[in-house]
Amino acid sequence: MLNLDDLVMGILNLTPDSFFDGGKHSGEATIVHHVKQMLSDGAKIIDVGGYSSRPGAKEVTEKEELERVLPIIKLLKQEFDELVISIDTFRATVAEQAVQCGAAIVNDISAGNIDHKMFDVLTDLKVPYVMMHMQGTPQTMQLNPSYQNVTHEVIKFFAEKLELLYKKGINDVILDPGFGFGKTLEHNFQLLHELEHFNLFELPVLVGVSRKSMITKVLNIKTQEALNGTTALNAFALTKGANILRVHDVKEAKQTVELFNWMQK
């Protein structure tokens, strides 16, 4: 398995309504070309998702999600034998079938809260699990996010979830604070500023801020203009202990990681 440190995870959205690249990657040839480019640019993991989790996203049936992701996972494993695929899903059945088709990581935005069968399925799958914090659901998460202290509450959330996972023998866990998922602008930046607090778990930390509204709102720009802001926040996240950067723009993220590593010498 990969050494989960200073890695770049490239995003492959197979949805028509994702906030940045919805509908952009359709057709097998286009998808294969895009993944080949991400791998060439330095991605070590490709995160495949078939359910848009942007605020207010429409519901997608389990059948539709499976039809979106399973054929593409099979295709990519045929084209790129050593490819490490992450399945971005909160549904246990989708996670299970995706791993059977070749996915090697489960990336769950709900930490088992939406589908309570997820932890039981993970017990059998025995693959790394990205556990993200989200307040509410994709449909409700940005209606009125509220915390007394967002960092403390997310840490408490992870501690409680990890206790359950460890009891089931699931130890290969990656933590994602969930930037933009049930958080205000102030919540997001507090989490980023205090990211090093998550090192207490001694687990890899994944950061996904790529082109999100915490950048566009501060700079008053469009999503398409948010690459420079993404790079800036990714660099800051690395100084705070981030191990994996989940991004749309792999080349720039990989360069950020390389420069950060040179600074550590």
Image: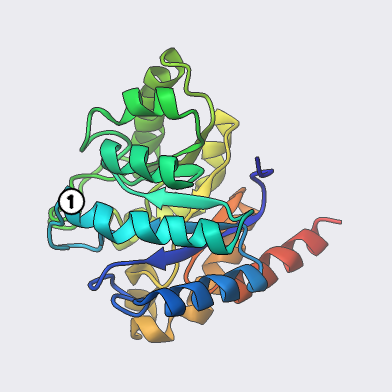
Return the residue nearer the eye: 135 or 30.
30
Query: The C terminus lies in which quarter of the figure?
Result: bottom right
The amino acid marked with disc number 1 is Lys
Regarding residue 37, the answer to whether it shows in the image is yes
Disc 1 target residue = 63
Return the residue nearer the eye: 36 or 192.
36
The residue under the point 23% across, 29% down is 116
Q: Residue extending furthest top?
A: 167
User: Which percent across, then down, holds residue 80?
Assistant: 59, 61
User: Which percent across, then down, holds residue 258?
Assistant: 74, 66
The residue under the point 47% across, 71% down is 248
From the viewer's perspective, tell me whether residue 197 is left or right of residue 262. left
Name the element at disc 1: helix
Quadrant position of residue 224:
bottom left
What is the count of numbered marks? 1
When the figure is inspected, residue 171 is found, relative to residue 195, above or below; the finding is above
Query: The N terminus lies in which quarter of the figure?
Result: top right
The residue under the point 49% across, 79% down is 227
Q: Residue extending furthest front?
A: 78
When the figure is inspected, residue 89 is found, relative to residue 38, above or below; the finding is above
